[in-house]
């Protein structure tokens, strides 16, 4: 099978039922603690109002809802449904981070790893324009790109396995950069779902954005923010982790 034959973004559609097992809520504890600390450092103490665009299954958000009042927005109804179950106190809405206008202002806009699904500079500018429209002056946007042009090697692979009461899931992910001249990389995913020795195999494919830091800085500043960058080491995932921060002027 050629990769072009694989439908796109199945993990957020017909395969969304795999998300809780593939990306367990517990895996976000350390990451979310950095978001909580950073939000309080930037905004001061208090129960601030936040909106997350591309909130997915709400796994990162689930560790923040004790401290913040949250609204969750995602393109995928299937992912919103997962998040509604996990975060019953959160208002959920279907929307695109490039175009949504809720007509409300927040203290912070969060765009977690969903920002990696934005693949062009024009769409990135639209996403930060959306963020600016939803922030009071002095409010902040925080984004967590998975990759930067400077640090992405030509390919990246990973394999992980998880078990639940009724199945074992093994996932293989292969990221590659078919055209290093553009801003898009392709992720190919294979899921082996083993139910008591009977295996089902599913494939998925996604396009992700790959931009140099200078472009992130330029786009965030052009949307009316001051720009800063925070770097962490995530011990639970053994990786360097960067959050991009914009403060609305
Ligand atoms: C990796 S998942 C996010 C997972 C989330 N961080 C969590 O903790 O569960 C990426 C999500 O981004 C959403 N997404 C992709 N493009 C989007 C867009 N333009 N606007 C809104 N959501 C988008 C997808 O539907 C998907 O749910």
Image (cartoon, rainbow, N blue to C red):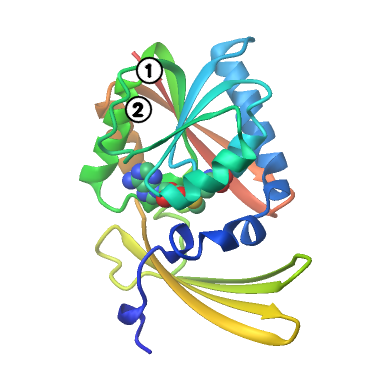
**At which x and y percent is residue 65?**
63, 27
The quadrant in which residue 215 appears is top left
Dot 2 surroundings within 10 Å: few (below 14), some, or many (20 or more)?
many
Q: Residue furthest bottom?
A: 1
Q: Look at the numbered disc 1 and give the secondary structure of its residue.
A: strand
Pick the residue in front: 227 or 26. Answer: 26
**At which x and y percent is residue 75?**
37, 46
Q: Look at the numbered disc 2 and give the secondary structure of its residue.
A: helix
Q: In the drawing, does residue 223 fall left or right of residue 206?
A: left
**Vertical side of 110 occupied by 167: above or below:** below
Residue placed under numbered mark 1 in the picture: 135
Dot 1 surroundings within 10 Å: few (below 14), some, or many (20 or more)?
many
C-alpha separation, residue under disc 2 versus residue under disc 1: 7 Å
Image quarter of the C terminus: top left
Q: Is residue 108 visible?
A: yes
Pick the residue in front: 238 or 120. Answer: 120
**Vertical side of 242 occupied by 9: above or below:** below
Residue drawn at the location 60% of the way across and 27% of the way down: 89
Residue drawn at the location 30% of the way across and 18% of the way down: 103
Disc number at residue 131? 2
Q: Are marks 2 and 1 in contact (CB under 8 Å)?
A: yes
**Vertical side of 185 occupied by 172: above or below:** below
Q: In the drawing, does residue 100 fall left or right of residue 201?
A: left
Q: Is mark 1 within 8 Å of ligand 1?
A: no
**At which x and y percent is residue 60?**
61, 40
Q: In the drawing, does residue 75 fall left or right of residue 89?
A: left
């Amino acid at each position: 099978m050629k990769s072009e034959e694989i439908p796109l973004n199945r993990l957020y559609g017909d395969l969304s039922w795999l998300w809780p097992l593939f990306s367990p809520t517990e895996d976000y504890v350390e990451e979310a603690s950095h978001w909580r600390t950073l939000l309080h450092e930037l905004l001061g103490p208090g129960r601030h109002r936040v909106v997350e665009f591309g909130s997915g299954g709400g796994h990162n958000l689930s560790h923040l809802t004790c401290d913040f009042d949250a609204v969750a927005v995602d393109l995928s109804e299937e992912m919103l449904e997962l998040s509604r179950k996990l975060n019953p106190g959160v208002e959920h809405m279907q929307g695109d981070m490039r175009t949504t206008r809720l007509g409300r202002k927040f203290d912070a806009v969060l765009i977690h790893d969903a920002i990696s699904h934005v693949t062009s500079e024009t769409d990135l500018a639209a996403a930060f324009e959306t963020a600016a429209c939803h922030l009071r002056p002095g409010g902040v946007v925080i984004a967590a790109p998975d990759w930067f042009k400077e640090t992405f090697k030509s390919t990246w692979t990973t394999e992980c396995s998880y078990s639940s009461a009724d199945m074992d899931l093994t996932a293989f992910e292969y990221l590659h950069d078919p055209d290093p001249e553009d801003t898009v990389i392709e992720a190919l995913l294979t899921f082996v779902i083993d139910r008591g020795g009977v295996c089902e195999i599913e494939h998925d494919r996604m396009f992700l954005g790959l931009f140099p830091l200078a472009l992130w800085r330029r786009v965030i500043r052009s949307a009316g923010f001051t720009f800063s960058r925070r770097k962490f080491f995530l011990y639970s995932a053994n990786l360097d982790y960067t959050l991009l921060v914009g403060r609305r002027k």
